[in-house]
Amino acid sequence: MSKIHVQDLNLYYSSFHALKDVSMNIEACRITSMIGPSGCGKSTLLRVFNRMNDLIDGVRIEGEVLIDGKNIFGRDILLSELRKRIGMVFQRPNPFPISIFENVAYGPRVHGLAKSKDLEGLVERCLSAVELWEVLKDKLHHSALSLSGEQQQRLCIARLLAIEPDVLLMDEPCSALDPIATAKIEELCFQLKERYTIVIVTHNMQQAARISDDVGFMLLGELVEFGQTDKIFTNPVDQRTNDYISGRFG
Amino acid sequence: MLRIFKTRETITKIQQRQISEFIIEKLIFLSGLASVLFVILIFVFLLKEGVSLFKTVSLKDFLIGKFWYPISDPPRFGVLPLLMGSLWVTLGAVLIAVPLGLGCAIFIGQIVPRSLRDYFKAGVELLAAIPSVVLGFVGLVTLVPLVRHLFHLRSGLTVLSGSLMLAFMAMPTIVSIIEDAFNAVPKSYREGSFALGATQWQTIYRVLIPAAAPGILAGVMLGMGRVIGETMAVMMITGNAAILPKSFFDPARTMTATIAAEMGEAVRGSSHYFALFAIGIVLFLITFLVNLVADFVLHRKK
């Protein structure tokens, strides 16, 4: 059974048809990237998985999304539990304006997961996992806003790991970062994929080719093609995919 | 292009434009200057009249004197009961208005459905539009008897009544500034918090309130400034007795009420007259300080 199963998904922002009959299967412990030009709906699709679109007025969703076989739009779904399992990293790093320690401790605190004693160990483990511990262990009580962009993005990932999700959604996580920082975040993704299912939205085709196992190409709200990365990039079935990856538009 | 500059009428047109530009610029400059100038003139006048008191009364007797008997013989001009009256009423009003205002701002800005938001906002703004004397009048016939009944007092004209009334008058200021502070918090903080599975309330009190803290504090300070300066309503319902209040159930008289009530009967040039101006200086300094702190807090981050 696939980790995320999407069947005939349609999404409307009021009258705008943003996702059209999207069907796909995302497998566990792989990196799946979604590519396509701006406005093609790739971020919208990502935000379906943790139901962030609920925050927007006038959104209507049809179709089915099953995560581990469970319908995420079902009545028995607790939104906070869903979002705890399906973590999200945003385009711009968005650490809270509180200390580094409190940023990582935020998730466990709101879910009542850890006693304050265990919290220190947990913060250390999460920061180590994103390779920030050595650099920041003496600055844990500094404001998270004092960090560099890359460090902030790492911190946001550490913040997610603290609530032990099993899916990580990344919405263009490197678009605000320089190439070196991008390489480091990609490196981190490779390490994380052993334990997490990662879905990453990117407009950077090289990035998709470098890091992902599977690729989905979207255009105007449609999922044009979905498959293994090397296959999509070397031998795409659809002409539009071919045009896009060879740089004819986008 | 060149031809335009050669004709005589266009040259006069350009000159006209330059002249009107010059006049408008100077007019705007003058209006800007006027506001600063008036503040300085008022302060100088206040200072000149108020300081004259200290030719006959020592500063110490004025500041820590416990009795305000301006027309007894000899008169006594102790501002302390009036100062404490103002502070008690203000403290009470702030204690009531801040939690209420914070809750109201959170409700209007974060919780109420978008379609109803404007109605609630208009309601709060309407509160600001009620003249204070009308509020005082309504308070006198409704709030005062209520306070008397509830707490079994001999009179409902107490600090508490004044605080309740003033809390409502400070609400619009507090609510609108706090709401602005919440709106200024980046949306990404809210999203980030929700994406971690936090509930709405957790997001509000763990992320939004800390992020908006300077604005919240500024709202509180400005609301406080409004309360200290308020005169009419508070004069009508706090009992107007110039004694040192010992609890919220004592009557009191504020500095503003004293000036308003006695200025008409004080003989111009008398110690009494100067004493009222001295109160004015104290009041001015307090509001100035409050506004200064609010301003400092609000702009510290930039």
Image: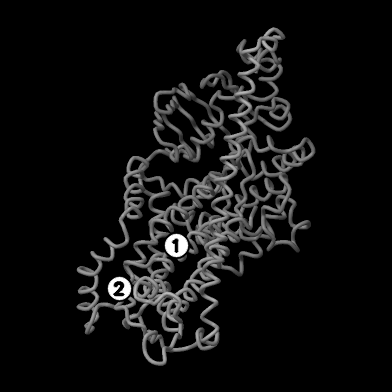
**Lateral position of residue B5 relative to residue B21, left or right:** right
Residue B111, placed above or below residue B297? above
Instruction: Please name the amino acid that badge 1 sits on.
Output: Gly
In-front residue for pair A250/B123: B123
Query: Crowding near pointer 2: few (<14 within 10 Å), some, many (20+)?
Result: many
User: Share a chain, discs 2 and 1?
Assistant: yes
Residue A181: numbered disc? none
The earlier-in-sequence mark between 2 and 1 is 2
In-front residue for pair A48/B201: B201
Q: From the image, which quarter does the N terminus of chain B lie in? A: top right
Instruction: Please name the amino acid that badge 2 sits on.
Output: Ser
Separation of marks 2 and 1 at Cα, in angstroms? 18 Å
How many numbered marks have been drawn onto this rendered protein structure? 2
Return the residue at label 2: B161
**Position in image of residue B10 (x %, y %):** 63, 14
In-front residue for pair B251/B63: B63
Q: Residue at x 39, y 69 (%)?
A: B93
Return the residue at label 1: B223
**Position in image of residue A8 (x %, y %):** 44, 24
* SS at mark 2 in the image: helix
